[in-house]
Image: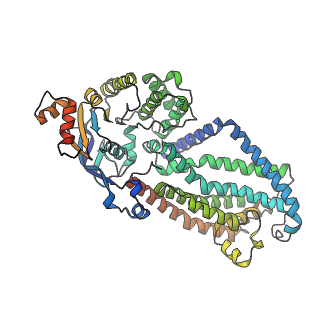
Amino acid sequence: MDYAIEISGLRKEFTPANRRSIKDMVFNRGNRNRIIACNNVDLKVRRGELFGLVGSNGAGKTTLIKILATIIIPDAGRALINGFDVVKEEDKVRRNIGLVTSEIKSFYGRLTGRQNLIFFAALSNLNSSEIKYRIAELAELLDLNDKLDNMFQEYSTGMKQRFAIARGLLNNAPILLIDEPTKSLDPLSAQNLHHLIREELVKKANKTVIFTSHSLLEIEKLADTIGIMNRGRIEVAGTLSQLRQRIGDENSSIEEVFNYYVKRDGKS
Amino acid sequence: MVKANGITLFLRKAWAFIRRDFLIQASYRMSFFTQWIGLFISIFTLYYISKLVDARASSYLAGYGVTYFPFVLVGIAATSYIGTSMNSFSSNVTREIWSGTLEAMLATPTSLSTIIFSLALYNFIQATINVLLYLLLGCLLLKVDLSQMNILATTVVLILTVISFSSIGLMAASLVVVFKKGDPILWAFSNISWFLGGVYYPITVFPQFLQTIAHFIPVTYSLRALRLAILKGYTVGVLKQDIAALAVFCLILVPLSILVFRWAIKKAKQSGSLAFY
């Protein structure tokens, strides 16, 4: 089987910043206060698959995405993106991924949307003619044309989120890591984004997408394969019907499936 | 996507940073112009102060063969570069972490060292314009004689100065990355440098023990060599002692700053705090 993302035994612990002393920061100490963000995560995502990762706040979804994006180094285990190791081959990994975060402030407010995209496109190794072409293409795809030359700080939250998506698509990478893409969107914009991800990115462009969400309905609607993350661990992964079969109730709703896996240890 | 070699990619990215910073600064139209007015006023302020101190200062400035104004003009112009070298890395990293844009940059195929170097480029261009304006205004309006300037010696000293102070700046940026604060060290180093290095006065005005301490900081050698190269036209050969001292600072500080920087990035990636402030 051809996998775009392969993760095995991935582990990441953090000491929260408010409990971290200078000694902890220098010597990597502070084990007593550590929080396990990823706990021996094993996961395989097939090429061209739309994988939805769902979990409560603090389940470890964003940490996992950041490890895959080479922004955080794992403590143990291995993660491969298109066969490249996220720790040892981070440059090759970054050429193969597009990252979309829900952090819509991560743009320059005093620049226009177009100027922001030009800047990030240059960092994504595009030359000037490629930048021009790609921005025109994305503006069309994401309906940004009317406001491309307005100052970024003047945009609505939904518009900023669309620019965050455009930024993640600039380098036309085969794998997209999308962290809570509809967090700030109204229902209509969220529907449009769902259509974009499923029809344009996965079906037409054959991209592999791993996206996180709080919304069970969103995951049910969008994902080919669902992973339920709880306390740093991927409790289960599979299609919704496979997850239903595993709990022995093929008529159960996604809420019931989710609750089964996150509450079965009696701690959540 | 058309493949480009490493240097072309680096230049493209460096240009993207310069363009971005210019556009952001130009969007604040008022401050874009008032900074030049401020520079103009500061030169005239120094000029009139120099009229007050010229008679008393002449004995201390005998080695430079100039009056107080050319002496302080070169000192102020040089500090523009020194200040940029020391402060711009850490202040720009802090700004990018604050705005959340560092994380977005880190997800692109651009190394952190390229990002941090490029973040400071616009500041260096501004500092160069400042230095040229200081010297040009001093020369044209206030009759400072720069005809003897030795371009080669000035360039060599300036390059060594920028490298040694940028190493200090890079170490401060590394501290920002790990501890989210680098300014206490920069504050201390800047103040010691400005006080002991001889920006506004030659270090010969100090008692002997302070003069001894002054020889342990690079700014002392930078300022003395720059003044002698610009105002008296001293050659690289004549300035070899100061140049050798600056080269020693570079040899110590450059590898040290690279080590500290690598350590800092690894620490921040391990703690997951690279993009947090």
What percent of the width, then of the height, locates residue B1?
43, 34
Decide which of A12, A70 is in the foreground and name it: A12
Q: Is residue B155 left or right of residue B21?
A: right
Instruction: Determine if residue A238 is in view.
Output: no
Query: Is A205 situated left or right of B132 in this image?
Result: left
Q: Is residue A90 visible?
A: yes
Whether A120 is drawn above or below B182: the answer is above
Work out whether B228 lies above or below A238. Answer: below
The residue lying toward the viewer, choosing from B25 and A5, is B25
Q: Is residue A62 above or below residue B187?
A: above
Residue at x-position 52% and y-position 21%: A146
x, y percentage for residue B48? 86, 55
**Residue depicted at 13% across the width and 36% down the height:** A247
Image coords of residue B225 (percent x, y): 72, 65
What colouring style does the render use?
rainbow
Q: How many marks?
A: 0
Where in the figure is residue B35, as x and y percent of width and height?
Answer: 72, 44
Q: Residue furthest bottom?
A: B208
Q: Is residue B4 above or below residue A145?
A: below
Q: Nearer the viewer, residue A251 or A131?
A: A251
